[in-house]
Amino acid sequence: MTNTRLKNNSILAVEAHGLVKTFGDNRAVDGVSLSIPTGSICGVLGPNGAGKTTTINMLATLSKPDAGNVKIFGYDVLSETQIVRQLIGLTGQFASIDEDLTALENLMIFGRLYGYSRQDARRIGNELLAEFGLSDVASRSLSKFSGGMRRRLDLAVSLISQPPLIFLDEPTTGLDPRTRTQMWQTIRKLVKGGSTVLLTTQYLDEADQLADNIVVIDKGRVVANDTPEGLKRSVGSSSLRLTVKDADHTANAAQIIRGILKAKVHLAEASELIAPMNNPDKLTDVLTSLKDAGIALSGVSILQPTLDEVFFALTGESSQAKKEEN
């Protein structure tokens, strides 16, 4: 779709104010506001049930907000829905492909639905199959596809129309590391070509690698909105990681550390504790207090902050715990 608005990078790709969505007594989204510049990648993080997917559904015209408003490239999602739908592509958490068709047939059908000629639909389909490493199985029945192959095909389907705004809801879940890396390269290529990407993910390293800006949603509200580096700085310049020799002393050690550092202490494993540390000079106080309490350590290290510490500091939940729930 040719539109002069899309050539103007000063217009926000996504501009949402005060989005609210309730399901019965559950206020799934509670006043979410977002501003996503054109030509950027925005990562959206949050615990399970935080409201990420519900927010995406409202931005992508799949769900009507109970309150608030959204504009996509300046077009109102509610009053200009059909225009907005021509500007977006969406890959959800579940495949939209037809298992009775081959990979190429799936892509060609979607291409035809988008108005391409049969020849162009076939060409674009073959290009996408090559992009996602599926050329060798283009004519294979989808009943013989692995989970990762199905996921890659679903991603390819969402890119057929070459939309200027792409919503990727946990696009690499279930993919092997090699395919995840290929997907990252594809996302970067899309943005380099002028697309804007809004990405939800359960992989913090993915957000760290790709996102220009990260929005953290917890309990339906935006609790942080900054660059990856800005978020890391917000939890301190470094973090303290201690391994307690006797796991029975872990709770007491956490209480001591919390009292000295005045910060949340994260139990990473049965006897491993992590806490943000703004002042490295406090390390001596921590070690001395633990020794006086008769708590022996088997390991001590100071680490630069990661998005995992950010996630825990903002939501009280570790990324590992979040993955174990899935």
Image (cartoon, rainbow, N blue to C red):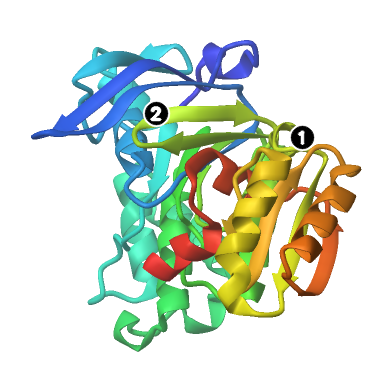
| Residue at the (55%, 12%) spot, across then down | 4
Can residue 326 be seen here? no
Mark 1 residue type = Arg
The C terminus appears in which quarter of the rendering?
bottom left
Mark 2 secondary-structure assignment: strand
Report which quarter residue 55 is drawn in: top left
Q: Which residue is mark 1?
A: 233
Q: Tell me: residue 217, above or below residue 7.
A: below
Query: Marks 2 and 1, Cα distance to the nearest angstrom?
Result: 21 Å
Mark 2, other Cα within 10 Å: few <14 / some 14–19 / many ≥20: many
Q: Is residue 73 above or below residue 314?
A: above
Q: Quadrant of residue 90?
A: top left
Q: Along the horizontal axis of the image, is 239 left or right of 169?
A: right
Q: Position of residue 14 (x, y in %)?
A: 48, 22
Q: Which mark is residue 221?
A: 2
- Viewer-closest of 230 and 93: 230
Q: Residue at x 64, y 41 (%)?
A: 263
Q: As rendered, which of 202 and 305 lies closer to the eye? A: 305
Q: Nearer the viewer, residue 214 or 2?
A: 214
Picture mark count: 2
Q: Residue at (70%, 37%) from the top-left corner?
A: 235
The numbered dot on residue 243 is none
Amino acid at pointer 2? Arg
x, y percent for residue 6: 56, 19
Packing grade of label 1 (10 A; few <14, some 14-19, many >=20) is: some
* Residue 271, percent from left and from top: 62, 73
Image location of residue 266, percent across then percent down: 59, 56
Q: Is residue 58 left or right of residue 26?
A: right
Q: Nearer the viewer, residue 161 or 34?
A: 34
Rendered position, 188 above or below 142: above
Mark 2 vs mark 1: which is more N-terminal? 2
Q: Residue at x 53, y 68 (%)?
A: 129
